[in-house]
Image: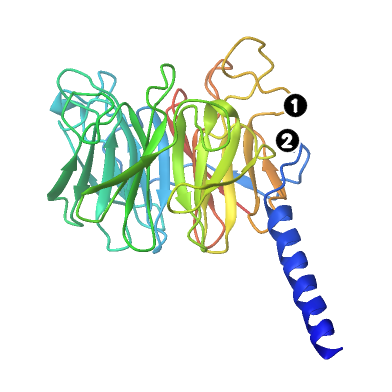
Amino acid sequence: MRSGLKSLATALVATIAGAGVAHAQASYPCVNNAPNPYKQVVGWEQGMTRAWAPTNNVYVDGKDNVWVMDRCGPKGCVAGDNGAPIWQFSPDGKVVKNFGAGMFGFPHTVKPDAEGNIWAIDGDAREGKGNQVFKFAPDGRLLMTLGKKGQGGTGNDVFDRPTGIAFAPNGDILISEGHAPTFGNSRIMKFDKTGKFIKSFGKLGSGDGEFKGPHVLAFDSQGRLFVADRSNSRVTFHDQDGKFLGAWKQFGRPSGIFIDKNDILYVSDSESEVAPGKDTHNPGCQRGIRFGSIKDGKVTAYIPPPPVKDAKFPPPEGVAADSRGNIYAGAVQDMAVYKYTK
């Protein structure tokens, strides 16, 4: 009898655990009416030597430093006199660093790793530059380069319009590629911390384990990889070997994602619209920033788009949050980095 009860109890625990996993992976309708507990803060940046250029990327590190990558001056970044695209701000908004002048054709992403090294993505081949990922030391020295300058393709040593980067708990480097409108390989490449290629996973498509323009990557506290699968209008998640675990549509069409230390997922939707036949067609979803716990996947707050200089400009793409709950969002066409506080 005791053996039978023990077996029954074990089965019940397994069933409950399985149900929890299934619930965490459930996808819900897009949420447009969650509360907005935030207000916008104007003029948070201090000490910039020029105005913002187009920026789609913002990131907050473990010390609450804010990292931003923009596209230099009006003429872009190819000419070194247009400024440097990599910015670091202190938690109180003061410029700490600005570097990378003359190196990038199409700046797309900057993100520091756990050791304080700074990784930056040049997302397209332009005038002999681009399609590369750079690793800088904390003092700005170039330590490593992945990819071949100005070249693309399907090989393991080249990138086709790289977009996002994330670092696994063991130091492995994961890089997404396949930016719209061509989408290219639409895969994720995995390297060890020395830059040695390990594997790639995913391909262009909309099925489980497939991507269409993966735009940003992030890990949660469990070591699961979350992907902004933008042109499939979903956030997908995977184990570190690329196995598909689930997909969520309730956060909208993700241009940017960020996961904080409390496993709150922030998603910036800059493109959803009712436009049959267009890649951005995502009926039922309004643009804006949504966030909620990855434990259940439920959206608990929604920040509507901020005022923009031109009504045709979309809202921010990049999104990040600091330990105090402040949210930062980077806008391309509006050439601004917004800050929201509770």
Q: Residue 155, percent across and down?
A: 24, 30
Residue ID for mark 2:
30
Q: Residue 66, percent across and down?
A: 39, 51
> Distance between the Cα atoms at labels 1 and 2?
6 Å
- Residue drawn at point x = 21 percent, y = 30 percent: 104
Extreme-right residue of the structure: 1
Q: Quadrant of the C terminus?
A: bottom right
Q: Amino acid at mark 2?
A: Cys
Q: Earlier in the sequence, mark 1 or mark 2?
A: 2
Disc 2 residue crowd, few under 14, some 14–19, many 20+, Cα 10 Å: many
Give the secondary structure at mark 1.
Answer: loop
Extreme-bottom residue of the structure: 2
Identify which residue, 79 or 236, lies in the foreground: 236
Q: Amino acid at mark 1?
A: Gly
Disc 1 and disc 2 in contact, CB within 8 angstroms? yes
Identify which residue, 256 or 18, lies in the foreground: 18
Q: Would residue 328 be visible to someone looking at this image?
A: no
Compared with 155, 137 (above or below) is below
Q: In the picture provided, is 260 more to the left or to the right than 295? A: left
- Residue drawn at point x = 44 percent, y = 30 percent: 203
Residue ID for mark 1:
284
Q: Residue 10, percent across and down?
A: 75, 76
- Residue drawn at point x = 72 percent, y = 22 percent: 283
